[in-house]
Structure formats: structure tokens, C-alpha cells
Image: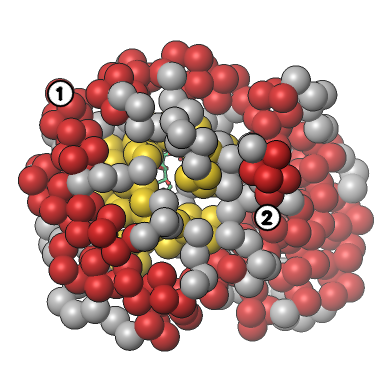
Amino acid sequence: MSEIKNKYKNPLLSAEGRILSPSRVAPGPMEGIMSPLYCAVMEKMGFADYWITPFFRLSEACPRPARFAEWIAKYSGGGFPVVIQLMACRPEIAAEATSKILDLNLVCGIDLNFACPSKTVTGSGAGGAMLKNPAEIEKITSAVKKSCGSIPLSVKIRCGYQSPVESPEIVKAVLAGGADFIICHFRTVQEGFKPVEGGLSRLAKTVECAGKTPVVGSGDIFTPEDASAMFRETGCKGIIAARGLLANPALIRIIEADMSGEPRPDEKVLKLAYFENMVRIAVSDPEEYLRGASLKELAACLLGRTNPLFKRLAPMNPKETVAAAESLIAEARQMEYLDNK
Ligand SMILES: Cc1cc2nc3c(=O)[nH]c(=O)nc-3n(C[C@H](O)[C@H](O)[C@H](O)COP(=O)(O)O)c2cc1C
């Protein structure tokens, strides 16, 4: 146990005490958001302990190991532990991919995505559309589990495709497939990201159905109070926060401070430091850091588009000048800008 404590501060453990993931409070995968800039600044600030990658779509044939290595490298650049998320419809391809990935020795876990609501994804029968077919979920989970060896396997689901009444069948399939833990977003696929009533009681039901298998909850964690309510009202063993990290990047650290009874770090100070680092990292290597979700998109989420600082940043071309970035940072230090969300 002391070894576990030394390695990670707050790991997710199985009922038997095996490490299932490096942290009980983790960033949710976000396709399109987890750009090199986002990952670099979050890592630099120490605002996350590991990444679950956005989904890697497996379709007709299993890619070569180099493709997986390239994908993982995007997230492990800072030496971070990485869980790769796979999206598959075919058990044999998912199993082959898992073997190839594990031979690379680059990840600390495999996660299967049966949750994505995007029409492009579900239209091809993948992601959240798989929830309509628990028998197939079981087959894929079981095939991947056989290739996983001692590496933990998680399965990301939603509470149902159309209705949360589907949840027990889905959880049964995931457990029969041998997943080590479940990550569950409380909305159904059809609900997308709409507000829903009773999300926490849906999660509590999932936790009950999962028995000894730990459940990590997901959905609407925007404040530390949302996190404590999710832990308290659902019995989940961990949580992931996704959109909430964009406006409050230190959210995980604040939640963890609450969990351990330590004083909360100052959100405003950390937000300013995050902003400064984000701008400096961006201008230090625009070729590397301004691919994918750009500085402007991250700044819009952080500050809000009506914030005067964002208005100053928006027309700025970070390729132009480091001095411009420094003057922006100096302006940000007038803290009221960061209050003005
Ligand atoms: C832009 C965006 C991209 C996402 N991409 C993924 C993804 O690739 N894989 C996944 O499992 N979930 C993905 N999610 C879902 C989140 O990980 C999370 O489960 C969901 O947003 C609910 O949590 P939140 O309310 O804290 O945002 C994505 C969410 C957003 C907003």
C-alpha cells in the first residue's frame, strides 16, 4: 500500500487494492480540445495527473503500431501516464489493436468508448450507438480484456442510448466482458449535452448495478461542490471533469484539496498563472502549439468572449511577437480581468 501511495497521490483502486488509474479525479477526454497547447499548459501547471486520450477510431483494418505510437506521443510528451481510448465495433480488431498497443509499452490503461453521441460516429454504428447492442459490447470488452494482461481496462458508457432504463443491461454486459472499471456519463446518447434532471440518481443506479466494480462518474462537474455531490450521492469511486476544466483549469486540484481536507488553492491566482503559461507556451513554438484547438479557443473558454482581455488577445497573431504576449500578460496581471467572466 505504501508503494501505491508513493507512486500516485490519490489512485483509483479495485476492491482488492490494485491500481486501476493514477487518480480518482481526472480530466475527461475531449476530442478537439486536447491540443498540444492544452496538454502542455495543464501539465506545466500540474493540473492533471494523467490523460485519457480522445477516441482512436478503429474501423476496417487494425493500424500499424507506429500509428498508435504517434497518437500516444501527442499526449505523453510531458512524460504523463496515458490511457488510450479506443472506439471499435469489431472485437477482433479491438483485440489486435490492444495487443499492438501494449507491445509498445507506452500506456497505463485501455479505455473503450461506447459513449460518443456525435452523429458522424453513431451514424456508423460506433461510440454511443453501441449501447443499443449490449451483446456486442460484451464481445468487444471480453476480446480486449483477453489482450490486456495486467493493464487495467475501463469502459466509457452513457446511461443508455435512448433511456436510462437501459443502464442495468449495459452495465451487465460490461461486467460480463470483464472490465476493471466503468466510466459513466449520466446522460443518454440522445440527450447529447442537454440539461437533465436526476443525473446523480442515474449514476447511483449504475453504481448499484456495478457492485464491486468501481464506477467513475461523469457529467456537469463545474465546481468542487458538484464533485462532492457526485461522490456523496452516487457512491462512485472517482470522477472525471471535462468542460468545467476549460473555465476553471485548476478544478481537479481544488476538488482534491477538498477531498483531503487541505485549504483550497486560490482559483484566481492559478487561473492567472495558467493564462500566462498558455500565452508564453503558444508564442514559444507556434508551429507546435497552435495546431488543433488554438490559443484563442482556449482563451475564450477561460475568459469568456466578452472579457476585455480576450478582446485584446483575439486579433493578436502569436507568431508575430513575444513582446505582444508579454504586454498581454502584464495586462492580465491586473486581476480584475480574470474576474470578469
Ligand atoms: C468537446 C468534447 C469532446 C469530447 N470528446 C470525448 C472523447 O473523445 N471521448 C470520450 O469518452 N468523451 C469525450 N467527451 C465527453 C467528456 O469526456 C465527458 O464525459 C462529458 O463532457 C461530460 O462531462 P462534463 O459535463 O464534465 O463535460 C467530450 C466532451 C466534449 C465537450
Residue appearing at x 25%, y 73% in the figure: 96
- Is 156 in front, or is 98? 98
- Total marks shown come to 2
| Coordinates of residue 340 in the picture (x, y in percent) | 73, 36
| Local crowd size for mark 1, using a 10 Å CA cut-off: few (<14), some (14–19), many (≥20) | some
Image disc number at residue 165: 1
Amino acid at the residue labelled 1: Val
Q: CA distance from mark 2 to mark 1?
A: 37 Å
Residue appearing at x 28%, y 55% in the figure: 145
Report whether residue 247 is seen.
Answer: no
Amino acid at the residue labelled 2: Met
Q: Is residue 84 left or right of residue 158?
A: right
Instruction: Name the quadrant containing residue 196.
Output: top left
Residue appearing at x 19%, y 80% in the figure: 61
| Coordinates of residue 272 in the picture (x, y in percent) | 81, 46
Q: Give the quarter of the figure containing the C terminus.
A: top right
| Coordinates of residue 69 in the picture (x, y in percent) | 46, 79
Q: Secondary structure at mark 2?
A: helix
On whether ligand 1 comes within 8 Å of the CB at mark 1, the answer is: no
Report whether residue 107 is seen.
Answer: yes
* Disc 2 target residue: 42
Q: Secondary structure at mark 1?
A: helix
| Local crowd size for mark 2, using a 10 Å CA cut-off: few (<14), some (14–19), many (≥20) | many
Q: Is residue 29 left or right of residue 93?
A: right
Q: Is residue 10 left or right of residue 340?
A: left
- Is 272 in front, or is 304? 272
Image disc number at residue 202: none
Q: Give the quarter of the figure containing the N terminus.
A: top right
Q: Earlier in the sequence, mark 2 or mark 1?
A: 2
Instruction: Name the quadrant containing residue 6.
Output: top right
